[in-house]
Image (cartoon, rainbow, N blue to C red):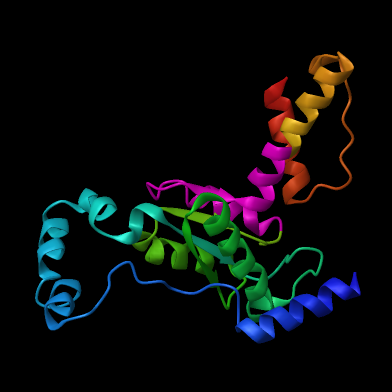
Amino acid sequence: MSNFYERSTIVHEHLRGKIGIVSKMRIESQDDLSIAYTPGVAGPCLKIAENGALARELTIKRNTVAVVTDGSAVLGLGNIGPLAALPVMEGKALLFKEFANIDAWPICLDTQNADEIIETVRRIAPVFGGINLEDISAPRCFEVENSLQDLGIPVFHDDQHGTAIISGAALLNALWLTERRIEDVRVVFNGAGASATACAHLYRDLG
């Protein structure tokens, strides 16, 4: 395992992180600059001011996700804080891009207060088409996720929903392979953190 740690550290040091911003427009003239920025950019601004729904068509909002953490439950590393969590959030943003062509950006918050996390996500939400909550410890993660369901965009807690979805699929597949019904089996959960609790809720819903 230490070999992976060392190789990953070398990659990060060489690349200075794993993600970056790529321009969709080429700026090769004064005219290009005037279209991309001022005065031309006033056109889409005014249209969005008249109809906010147009932001999904005229800006990056449609295909952009915020990967939000407070650094309190990072992988198997525990509460290592927002700065140390950044490589993991960069990695999640990279996965979004590589496997779904979605532009995601790490947002590592310097607070572990649930109300402050909720308020911060609410304030940045207009930029994004979705919120991916990541590596926030229980029970805080439940309050944060539940409180943000009225944003009008998907709010997904990876440690809860991601684990429940994939393990639920594995459970159904195992039942199919062994010719058993979900109503007839018992499932043991080791702990009652974010992942186990969400899995328990989903398995109950599955029958």
Write the residue at 60% across / 84% down.
Answer: 16
User: At which x and y percent is residue 40?
Assistant: 10, 71
Count the marks: how many?
0
| Left or right of residue 60, residue 43 in this image | left
Instruction: Please check the rendered image and state whether residue 155 is part of the magenta-colored stretch, yes or no.
Output: yes
Position above or below: 115 against 87: above
Of residue 178 and residue 196, the one placed in the foreground of this image is 178
The residues colored magenta run 138-166
Instruction: Please check the rendered image and state whether residue 108 is part of the magenta-colored stretch, yes or no.
Output: no
Write the residue at 39% across / 59% down.
Answer: 128
Of residue 14 and residue 125, the one placed in the foreground of this image is 14
| Left or right of residue 207, residue 32 in this image | left
User: At which x and y percent is residue 144?
Assistant: 56, 56
Q: Quadrant of residue 1?
A: bottom right
| Left or right of residue 168, residue 69 in this image | left
Q: Quadrant of residue 8?
A: bottom right
Residue 120 seen in render = yes
Residue 198 seen in render = no
User: At which x and y percent is residue 106?
Assistant: 54, 69
Write the residue at 66% across / 85% down.
Answer: 14
Q: Quadrant of the C terminus?
A: top right
